Image (cartoon, rainbow, N blue to C red):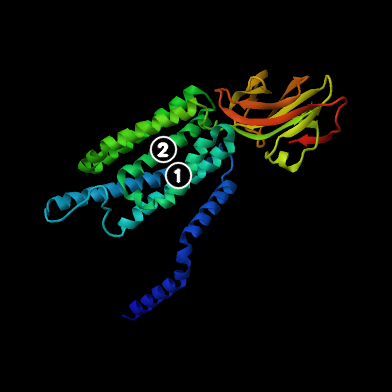
Amino acid sequence: MGRTLVTQQLENRARAWAAPFRRYERHIAAAAMVLGFAVDNYSFGRVDHPGPHIVFLAYLLIAAASIAIAHALQARADRAAAKAPDTETFPEAAPAPGRLRVWLPAATQFALGGLWSGFLVFYWRSAALAASWPFLLLLVAFLVGNEVFRRYHARLVFASLLLFFALYSYAVFVVPVFTRTLGLGMFLGSGALAIGAFLLFLRLLSGLGRARYRQSRLKLIGGALLITAAMNAFYFTGVLPPLPLALADVGIYQTIRHTGAVYEAQGEGQPLAARLGLARAVVHVAPAQKLVLYSAVFAPIKMTTRITDRWQWWDGRAKSWRTQSVVSFAISGGREHGYRGYSVKSNPRAGDWRVDIDAEDGRLIGRLAFTVATVPRPAETTTRILR
């Protein structure tokens, strides 16, 4: 009795201490989410290291197990209620009994939140915002919505479809990491792997609670078909980032000298806004002078693929980008700071330019925009050693 009284007093003190913070609960949750993303961005290293994949697989297993156990317990509760006609039941909304009513949806939310945060880290590193912003925005929406819609994680259809999207998003980049191959075949194979895993999960749900599963089967299959169609649309329109490739460095220079492992570049100094990508860099070019586009593209260890530099000039009369030069070359993966390479454009005309760095399957790895201004004599440059 004494211990119970002490426990009650401690609980009352804890509630009193936490009360002033309740009005800031949403702000605290948002800050915690941002902090969690920052920690993940720091702690998740290379996409070809085993650590992140162990974490992702653990999250997927926790999410699948918590959804399946909650489904089994609710199916059992539904069968028990069916034997007692005077008890009202709500098959889709009623949670599992006891303490699991809280902990299982919380476990699902925790695992999915970890997946969205980790996926956002890697897809963000790989994405060119000009092409991939819709997919990144979707991941951000899932990360934010994971907290906002936490009560819906107790619902079978909602949680299961989120799991399928997570499986698909993971398969898209883990298959190329292990096969060391990119392209359409790998994307289609990744989708087939995700669909196969989800069908096994649906079979497990059916075995754990056939009647409840049948009530949701059409919604589950229809939702999975929509997610599959969306992922394919993202890929074929170039919106899906080309993970596991990622642009590590890019720049425009007047000359580059390559001696052994050392890349020495001569280029103009640029204002801070241009270095941060908030404004176009202005490059001054004298007659007969060349420009060099340097890039370092990260690829997983032992992966060999090709990238393409597409030099484009803005035609003000036609209001469109005109391709002036296309240079393609092979890269090899494994280097921490990316495989270094460059392409050269002779006698670039004045005006706005951009160089698209494309993956072998045409998806955009990165883009550098700049303005060329013609001058009578070469501009003053400084030397930079490119790592």
Q: Which residue is drawn at 17% across and 54% down?
A: 88
Q: In which quarter of the image is residue 191?
A: top left
Image position, residue 214 (x, y; %): 22, 38
Amino acid residing under circle 1: Phe
Q: Residues within 10 Å of mark 2 (few under 14, many from 20)?
A: some
Work out how far the residue at label 2 is from the one at label 1, CA to CA, in angstroms: 10 Å
| Left or right position of 222 against 369 | left
Outermost residue, right direction?
377
Residue type pointed to by label 2: Phe
Q: Residue 165 carries which label?
A: 2
**Element at label 2:** helix
Q: Residues within 10 Å of mark 1 (few under 14, many from 20)?
A: many
Left-right relation of 2 to 85:
right
Q: Which is more foreground, mark 2 or mark 1? A: 1
Identify the image quadrant of the N terminus: bottom left
Asked whether residue 257 appears in the rendered view, the answer is no
**Image coordinates for residue 190, horizontal then vertical, percent:** 44, 29
Question: Is mark 2 in CB contact (under 8 Å) with mark 1?
Answer: yes
From the image, tell me which residue sits under label 1.
Answer: 142
Q: Tag 1's secondary structure? A: helix
